[in-house]
Amino acid sequence: MSEEELLYTSMINVATSSIPVAFLAINSENEITHLYLSKPFKPILVRCIGQSFKRCLNLVFGLETAGMIYEGYHECFIKRAPIDLVRIKHTTSRGLFEYLDWKFVPVDNTNSVIIFVHNITESVLIEEEFTSMSEQYESVNRELCIAVSNLDFHLMDIEQAHKKVAALYRITSIVQRTVNEQEVLEEILDGITRELGFSNVSIMLIDEVEQELKLTAFRGNLDTGVRIPLGKGITGYAAQYREVIYVEDVSSDPRFIDGGNGCISEVAVPLIVDDRAVGVLNIDINDGRTLQPYDLDLLRSLASQVAMTIAHANHVAKIELQAITDGLTGLYNYRYFRTLLDQEFRRSSRYKRPLALIMIDIDYFKHYNDNNGHRQGDEALSKVANLIKQCCRDVDFAIRYGGEEFAVLLPETDIKDACIIAERLRSMIAGHDFPNGESQPNGKLTISIGVSGFSHDAGSIFELIDHADTAMYQAKQCRNSVCLFNND
């Protein structure tokens, strides 16, 4: 290889090692004669040399996208002019999106075409993230513009308007700093009391089960245990009918519920998410001030930010919960169990506290599945999981270990108490009337349980799991029983 060729090769090496690119040469027979790729892609595509370019495109990108790319190549080949294809979207075999720029350039005095492919996925994703953030900021700015446009400058001078809008901006900017619902609600209340001068402010969210409002965050002199039925009081009325209610003199309104804080005026602003009320922003005024229309507009804007925060926090919480729970039973999954076990074992080791583990297996579950079908089997798994949760205390962790096996991690629990809980669970399952349970080999659907504990018999995480598992298999020798690990 000549010095000049070595120099060109080195240039290409520098390019392909810095950015995800590919160079291809296609001859007049539609064959790939040369292929130069960034290193991460070599194991996958190096076998394409000598193959049909069109066939390789079909295999890698699918017919629709491959047709678009091949059309660009064909146009370049016929017209002998450069052709660009920008931001071609491709779904990988793992279901991820890739974005590629394609450039086709004819080679002078030959029938070959050079193709340059640039993977711009990272740039596109960054651009999309930036666009998303810009839209969020634009939403906040629109709220500010609406608030400004509705200000009554006949009743408030320019300096006061500036102060109010600046206060609104400072308060709503809190929403963009965190997705933690309680943290945001607390900071917004701090902002309202600090910037707008209200002293008794609360955010009440709707309890869908009880159909009442419960106090979630507040500032001032309020009863922490207050719960207001929907439709009752000024706050409950605002929630049920999704209306902003401002009562200048509460003594003249029969809906008013006296909270004992010297309230003179009250304003309740519903929190709306997807056209549904999720709570109320409520302010008790005891300093005699009268709210103007621009004050209500500001509070509406604040309420919309609070509602947006709640919706976002709920979405994040739902995603996080799905990642750590089993979809069928609702119990923690095995992956999260390992995290919990590591966390609790380290705590027990550090403070010399007991920790117990229960391993559970449903007896003859394959027989139950074969006789009743997988749908009935899934219902049985779900019911067993519910019974396990009923037996657990608030501090315990119930896990679907896999298949028909479950586990319960018991912090601050010695072996004696763990065996009592295990026996109570065994008895509850054995006493439950499962559909067609009488057709089981032992006449009903039952479980076998193994118990181990730190530091009773286990000195490590491995031993805690292994001993409980061994004890469970000992219990399965006679079924429907509880077995404590025995070193003998």
Image (cartoon, rainbow, N blue to C red):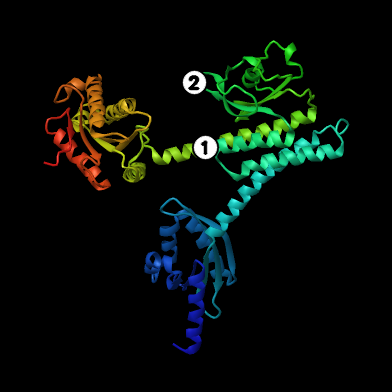
Q: Secondary structure under badge 1?
A: helix
**Does residue 215 appear left or right of residue 433 in this picture?**
right
- Among the 4 quarters of the image, the one containing residue 341: top left
The residue drawn where x is 55% and y is 39% is 180
What x and y, as percent, mark residue 371? 20, 27
Question: For mark 1, what is the residue?
Answer: 315
Can residue 355 be seen here?
yes
Observer-nearest of 214 and 197 = 197
> For the residue marked with disc 2, what is the amino acid?
Val
Q: Residue at x 61, y 33 (%)?
A: 307
Residue under the image location 37 percent in, 66 percent down: 43
Residue 171 place in picture, x, y as percent: 68, 39
Image-based side of 26 in relation to 390, left or right: right
Establish if 282 lies above or below 336.
above
Residue 59 placement, left or right of 387: right
Circle 2 residue: 209
